[in-house]
Image (cartoon, rainbow, N blue to C red):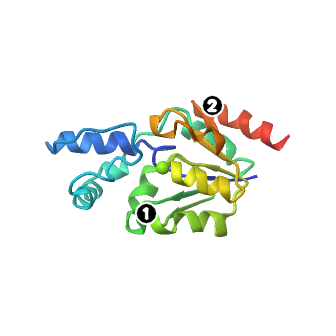
Amino acid sequence: MIICSDVDGVILNYIQGFIDFTRDEDIDYQYNPENYGVITGIENAENLRKRFHAKDYLRQLQYYEGALEVLNRLVEKDEVHLVTAIQPECSEMRAENLTALNYTSLQCVGDAAKERVIIEEVVPDVMIEDRPELIKAFHGAGIPVFYPDWHPYTRGMEAFGTPFSHWNQIPELFQRMEA
Ligand SMILES: [Mg+2]
């Protein structure tokens, strides 16, 4: 099986990393978990993103519980491709953050290219994604989507994908799909 997974919001907790950054830097910031995108739509978004990425946060984001163990087990028999909307210049930091994780490939392609790379180049049998627009897009392209339901912003996605609450549920959900 060809598995493709997003990284931020699914495997790594980019949200908490950004919140920690604003706290450490004394930046006035209030995260709204109802909205997708931790930086999108706020004042000085681009400037803040650059400052965040210029520090070491991106090398040490925390894994969501179970992600590392479950993916490392899956990659023993399946292909696991990681495609992230983070910019290509962040590739080295991202790879460093993912040192403990085994995967088939890792691509940092930028926001604009992500959907196309996954649908046209990776062509996965399953996709793991948290961004509502992309959950809909991959579903529309005929790719079964699994999404983490611990983010309030994924509420209402049941028509476009299968929710999961913990990575431990993923192997069984995949098995059921293959059967
Ligand atoms: Mg994401």
Establish if 119 lies above or below 150.
below
* Lower position in the chain sequence, tag 2 or tag 1: 1
Residue ID at (26%, 56%): 45
Q: Residue at x 46, y 34 (%)?
A: 152
Looking at the picture, how far across and down is residue 148, in whole percent? Answer: 55, 38
The answer, for residue 5, to whether it is visible in the render is no
In front of the other: 166 or 101: 166
Instruction: Residue 164: give x, y in percent of width and height.
Output: 61, 34
The residue indicated by pointer 1 is 91
* Residue at position x 57%, y 30% in the image: 165
88 lies above or below 173: below
What is the three-letter code of the residue carrying label 1?
Ser
Q: Is residue 110 shown left or right of residue 137?
A: left
Q: Nearer the viewer, residue 48 or 157?
A: 157
Mark 1 secondary-structure assignment: helix
Quadrant of residue 71 within the rendered picture:
top right
Label 1 neighbourhood size at 10 Å, few (<14), some (14-19), many (20+)?
A: some
Q: Horizontally, is 153 left or right of 23 in the view?
A: right
The response on whether ligand 1 sits within 8 Å of label 2 is no
Do we see residue 172 in this rendering?
yes
Front residue of this view, candidates 19 and 97? 19
Please state the horizontal and vertical placement of residue 30, each as a whole percent of the image. 24, 38
CA distance for labels 2 and 1: 27 Å
Residue, x 63% and y 31% (percent of image)?
Answer: 168
Amino acid type, label 2: Asn
Q: Are marks 2 and 1 in contact (CB under 8 Å)?
A: no
Disc 1: residue Cβ within 8 A of ligand 1's nearest atom: no
Circle 2: element type: helix
